[in-house]
Amino acid sequence: MRELVEKDRHIIVVPADFKCANKGTITNVDSKYFTIELQYEPKGIMRHNYCEFYTQTNHGTLYFDSYAETIEGNTIKIVNPAKHRFLQRRQYTRIKFVKDLDLKFDSGVHKITTLDISAGGMKFRTSENVDIEKSYSITLPLSEKQSVECMFSPIRIEKNENGGYTMSGRFEYNNSKDKMTLTQYCAKRSIEIRNK
């Protein structure tokens, strides 16, 4: 585990209450523990209560469960996990996500059908001519109780043989919690799909 969890690497911490998701930097690693300096006050993170951890390594996105042995201010000492897994090699876990949604801009709405999403962006189909130079707002419904609002900037557009367009682009967030929520959602769905 020591070669995977490295000092100065950024890491996302998601406790049972995902609204208390946090992020920080790994400041020390030894044979039993690693220490994180959190960016925000560790609300929702309690000693000996399991949290989910996500960090980007040279091998892909690393995911594991563990718990805090000590909490002192914004510094938490985490027990090295017994198990870990790599979600995939790309920076963000991408999942199939087929929904009919609205891509909103100043003067109107484009009707789109999403194909896949990640915390980094999405791909969708549309029969409408979307201006690749504009930014758009979109609401992603993750469940009946949870959704994420963000901005979408198109990067690539392809004309389909049977008409319409396939576009892909990146998300920009109003706050880091929305990004963490979508990161966690995609990671969990990826694991669920793989275990079916």
Image (cartoon, rainbow, N blue to C red):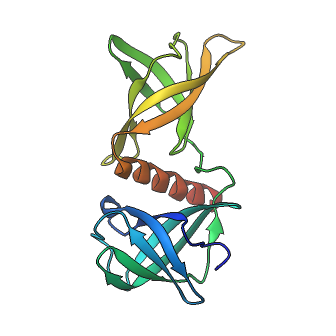
Of 156 and 85, which appears nearest the observer? Answer: 156
Q: Considering depth in this image, is 188 or 150 the residue closer to the camera?
A: 150
Q: Residue at x 64, y 69 (%)?
A: 85
Does 173 sit above or below residue 56?
Answer: above
Q: Residue at x 48, y 33 (%)?
A: 99
Residue furthest to the bottom in view is 32
Query: In the figure, is residue 143 to the left or right of 192?
Result: left
Residue 23: quarter of image: bottom left
Q: Residue at x 58, y 55 (%)?
A: 190
Tag count: 0
Expressed as whole percent of the image width and height from the top left, the position of residue 101 reads 43, 27
Residue 3 image offset from top left, x and y in percent:
68, 75
Viewer-side residue, 29 vs 139: 29
Q: State whether residue 162 is above or below residue 103.
A: above
153 sits to left or right of 63: left
Q: Quadrant of residue 89?
A: bottom right
Report the quarter where the N terminus lies: bottom right
Say which quadrant the C terminus sits in.
bottom right
Residue 63, above or below 76 = above
In percent of width and height, residue 80 lies at 55, 83
Q: Quadrant of residue 108?
A: top left
Q: Please report the residue visible at 60 percent of the width from the left and 73 percent of the height from the top.
A: 5
Q: Position of residue 110 (x, y in %)?
A: 43, 16
Placement of 127 over or under 80, stated as above or below: above
